[in-house]
Amino acid sequence: MATQTQGAGQPPAAVQKLLRAIPKVDDVLLWFEGATAPAALIKAAVREVLAARREEILAGRLADAAALKREQLLPQIEERLAEKLRPKFRTVINATGVVIHTNLGRSLLPPAAMAPLLAVGTHYANLEFDLATGKRGSRYSLVEELLCELTGAEAALVVNNNAAAVLLVLETLAAGREVIVSRGQLVEIGGSFRIPEVMAKSGAKLVEVGATNRTHLRDYEGAITEATALLLKVHTSNFRMIGFTKEVALADLTALGAARGIPVMEDLGSGSLIDFSRYGLAKEPTVQETIAAGADVVTFSGDKMLGGPQAGLIVGKRAIIDRVKQNPMNRALRIDKFTLAALEAVLRLYFDEEAAVRTIPTLAMLTMPLAAIERRARRLSRRLGKSLADRGTVALVRTSSRVGGGSLPEMELSSCGLAVTPRKMSVNELERRLRAATVPVIGRIENDCLLLDLRTVADDEIAALAATLIEVFGRSGE
Ligand SMILES: *Cc1c(COP(=O)(O)O)cnc(C)c1O
């Protein structure tokens, strides 16, 4: 009688029988004799599929022993195996229109960076070897001169990313002492990078001054004590305060710092080497302007508006940069040879601003004329032709792209794209299928359409994008 009270649904005897019908792992492995896939992956795929069936039996969701036959299990295992064999880190088509898309890898490198990357990947290089003296060299010196020439700074250092740069500089200059920051600049960047928390990790004590919306020079002045190590300005790159606001100009802050013998740092975030306002974007301070305004140390990202590899660039006065270089923490935050190779190639392009804007993808996409984006949209539309038939409609639409990466948040870049409306599946299903495609396509859902913004789709991706759309709609009748 106990059998009646145990387990919902299937009586235990039937469950036991089904469980016994699951083939043994070793027996299933025989189905794969001669297969070329790594044995460990085959075994894992077999185990996972068998375990999933076991779960279903125990949950009462599998009641037919036919589901445990080779004809049923083999395709499931093969599919699982194919998934395991496919690279996890893959390229996608960014049709979101967000140029510096942190989740999709931020900046794309220019063609000029490819040969150096390949070369240092396949050959030994003078990473830490001084070719002039034959002695140990410093990896930082390889791009230091370039950074100084481009920014007007006395010295430079590059670390893993800008978050690391900020942490390293704060730890070097202010551990155990005080750093004065305006309340309006205690920003969160995303991915849990918050100025107060980074400050705490560095061992420096945050001294907040001013009000959220207004900070005056006298606020900084009044907060200076014996313990003050640094005046910090954080560029509020990812939000904008409007209305009754006041920030102290960097030049005023550096004058105060100089008078009181306290260094001034600016965390520029997505620091840029060119003035984007010349190309119709909002005015942002360039790194050169920040150095010229007297900042002692400036930090910025390599892969935001600069359009290079992930890196944290630190430029400023020699005495300060020298101290930062000697910090043992520096070793833990150092960049690798690939980053250095790509960064040098990107920096060199900046000596010719016109070439930089044309060939550095982030810059080219940010400054791309609407007519060029529209041409791309028309090309995609032509390629699709009538292939979606009655399964969906495609319309050429005006939209706006975003800079992304927490840069110029309020800036809307006039753009062009295709609005795709599926007829036989939901727009959410379309979005899911595009993500699951061989070359995943990431768009955005807007007004019940899937919007593909062509600003961030390269010319050589149009054919693949069209093919993916056709493939995904082809299966919609199923
Ligand atoms: C983006 C940003 C950072 C962090 O830079 P990462 O390169 O992402 O580490 C720090 N400060 C500011 C102001 C930023 O905008």
Image (tube, helix red, strand yellow):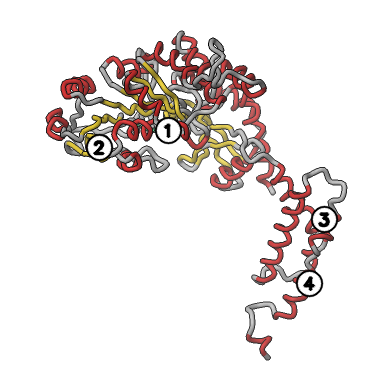
Evaluate whether residue 205 shows in this view.
yes
Question: Does the closest atom of ligand 1 sit within 8 Å of the Cβ of label 4?
Answer: no
Q: Give the amino acid type for the residue marked by disc 3 in the picture.
A: Leu
Tell me the residue at 77%/45% (across/down). Answer: 38
Q: Earlier in the sequence, mark 2 or mark 1?
A: 2
Q: Left or right: 243 with respect to 323? A: left
**Mark 4 or 2, nearer chain start:** 4
Res 177 label = 2
Secondary-structure class at tag 4: helix
Disc number placed over residue 328 in the picture, else none = 1
Quick one: 138 or 461, which is closer to the camera? 138
Is tag 3's residue or tag 4's residue first in the polypeptide sequence? 4
| 476 or 37, nearer to the observer | 37
Between disc 1 and disc 3, whose residue precedes? 3
Specify whether 47 is left or right of 366.
right
Label 3 Cα crowd, 10 Å radius (few <14 / some 14-19 / many 20+) = some
Mark 1 vs mark 3: in front: 1
Q: Given this view, does label 2 or label 1 mark the residue nearer the observer?
A: 1
Which-is-in-front pick, marks 4 and 1?
A: 1
Residue type, label 2: Arg
x and y, in percent, of residue 70 in the image: 83, 59
Is the shortest distance between ligand 1 and the CB of mark 2 under 8 Å?
no
Picture coordinates of residue 355, whole percent (x, y): 49, 10
Name the spot of residue 17 as percent of width and height, x first. Answer: 77, 75
Q: Residue at x 68, y 46 (%)?
A: 477
> To which residue does mark 4 refer?
20
